[in-house]
Image (cartoon, rainbow, N blue to C red):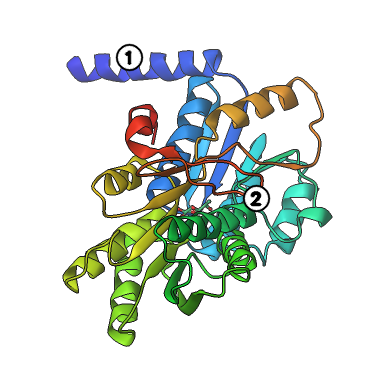
Amino acid sequence: MKKTLIMLTALFLSLSLCVGASAVTIAFSQIGQESDWRTANTDSVSNAIKAEGWDYVYDDAQQKQENQVKALRNFISQNVDYILFTGVVSTGWDEVLKEVNEAEIPLVLLDRMPDNIDDIEYAAAFGGDFVEEGRRMALWTANYVKKLGRENEELNVVILEGTTGADAATGRQNGITEILKDYPNLKVIASQTGNFTRAEGQAVMESFLKAHDKIDVLLAHNDDMALGAIESIKAAGLQPGKDIIIVGCDAPKTAFDAIIAGEMNATIECTPLYGPFVVDALKKLMAGEELGREVIHPEESCFDAEGGIVYSLDGRVSEKAADKIGERLY
Ligand code: GYE
């Protein structure tokens, strides 16, 4: 009797869901769960979509391009209404994105952009300005070194790069290189990928420390790798944030904690909170509006221990992490 009742209730619920549900299905091909940034990005987008009552299909590709290609093809065969996409690397999407275009499913690009962006149709795009983030990491560092009165000292710099082939990594690296050219005292002695993860950041930093007697600065393409590296620096008997200046990117709460604890020096913000932009864009598209074909970069800041350090070519000044941690949403 009880069983029948449960079954009837389930049937009623699914029927009423079918009747009440919007006919719209949004699908999202996400890269993986490699960092705090990624988790916050997934949560922001997923929660915002679910809050609208739209049907939602989510796929986590575990940092593998072939899984993303499969997911996109599944979305096409399910005939979803909109596809949200961020690719783990920038190349290799020609065929599958052409298939998405041929199926006439509007494509909304998020975060990392494919290199064939000018040859495909997309309805809207939101991403970080990765080159600018790299410039800011290097510029903050150069100005901090000046503040310490060490601008004439030769300082050895190591870099933890993000996933090889991702525009988030190449862009940040290019931005860093562009600025460091003007600061010959900041000498890059090693640069290697840590795949945007804490575990790999820790392992690669350990190998850097074994190979080099003197490391003065660590620039990490994301904060997760910086946080992993901090563990290796401590294990080597050094003081992170003091013996080695550490600058990361993303600005999640975990990086704020490390800055406030004096173990990390600065982080450049790269917001993962795309939910509101995406929902707004989807609503406009559903209403038949055409959005311009351009990549829109959200506004970003920089946080450190004291605030007041110039970190951008247009003269922006860093904010004090301790004053801002209460407002952090990720
Ligand atoms: O910085 C990193 C994540 O593509 C901007 O990917 C994103 C990067 C972010 O794994 O933490």
In the image, residue 75 above or below residue 179: above
The residue nearer to you, when weighing 24 against 305, is: 305
**Quadrant assignment, res 254:** top left
The residue nearer to you, when weighing 99 against 141, is: 141
**Mark 2 in CB contact with mark 1 (< 8 angstroms):** no
Decide if residue 22 is on the left or right side of residue 234.
right
Q: Where is residue 29 in the image (x, y as percent from the top left)?
A: 55, 48
Q: Residues within 10 Å of mark 2 (few under 14, many from 20)?
A: few
- Residue at 44% across, 73% down: 153
Q: Which amino acid does label 2 sit on?
A: Leu
Q: Residue 64 carries which label?
A: none
- What residue sits right under mark 1 in the picture? 9
Q: Nearer the viewer, mark 2 or mark 1?
A: 2
Query: Label 1's element?
Result: helix
Decide if residue 136 is on the left or right side of residue 285.
left
Q: How crowded is mark 1: few (under 14 residues within 10 Å), some or many (20 or more)?
A: few
- Residue at 19% across, 74% down: 236
Identify the residue at the far bottom of this view: 211
Q: What residue type is labelled 1?
A: Thr
In the image, residue 240 above or below residue 305: below
**Quadrant assignment, res 276:** top right
In the image, residue 75 above or below residue 87: above
- What residue sits right under mark 2 in the picture? 313
The residue nearer to you, when weighing 47 against 321, is: 321
Q: What is the quadrant of the N terminus in the image?
A: top left
